[in-house]
Image (cartoon, helix red, strand yellow):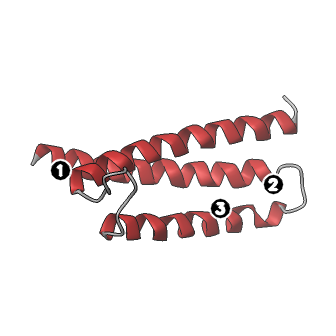
Amino acid sequence: MTQLEMNEQARRSYDQAESQLRSVYHQLATRKGELMPDGQPKQGSLYAAQEAWAKFSEADALATAESYRGGSIYPLIYLNAKEENTLARTAHLARQLEAMQQS
């Protein structure tokens, strides 16, 4: 597998993780009543936390990949860091959702 192919696979994997995160976020926001009638998020506590997390995730991925900047492996390192953060956030939100569903 070439570096380009690995980078493309990392993009697909990250996109899938991001899609899962959006789904769990939407379910939790619905459960918390933090969605507008058109399905857009309200600016409640979950929205604020998600916005802060997104900024952290971006900064963390950039810091993780910084020493590879300019190299062909940079996208792979960056996207792997983004995916790792996204999977962790998804698991965190899924635990919140599960706890609310059990209440």
Mark 3 vs 2, N-terminal side: 3
The residues tagged by marks 3 and 2 sit, at their Cα atoms, a distance apart of 10 Å
Q: Residue 100 carries which label?
A: 1
Q: Which mark is residue 62?
A: none
Q: Quadrant of residue 60?
A: bottom right
Select label 1 or label 2 by which is in front: 1
Local crowd at mark 1 within 10 Å, few (<14), some, or many (≥20)?
few
In the image, residue 44 sits, relative to residue 103, either above or below, namely: below
Position of residue 56 measured from the top left corner of the image (x, y, whole percent): 54, 69
**For this rendering, which residue is in front, 68 or 10?**
10
Residue drawn at point x = 70 percent, y = 40 percent: 10
Asked whether, in this view, residue 48 is left or right of residue 82, the answer is left
Q: Indicate the secondary structure of the residue bearing disc 1.
A: helix
Residue drawn at point x = 31 percent, y = 56 percent: 35
**For this rendering, which residue is in front, 1 or 15?**
15
Q: Indicate the secondary structure of the residue bearing disc 2.
A: helix
Q: Indicate the secondary structure of the residue bearing disc 3.
A: helix
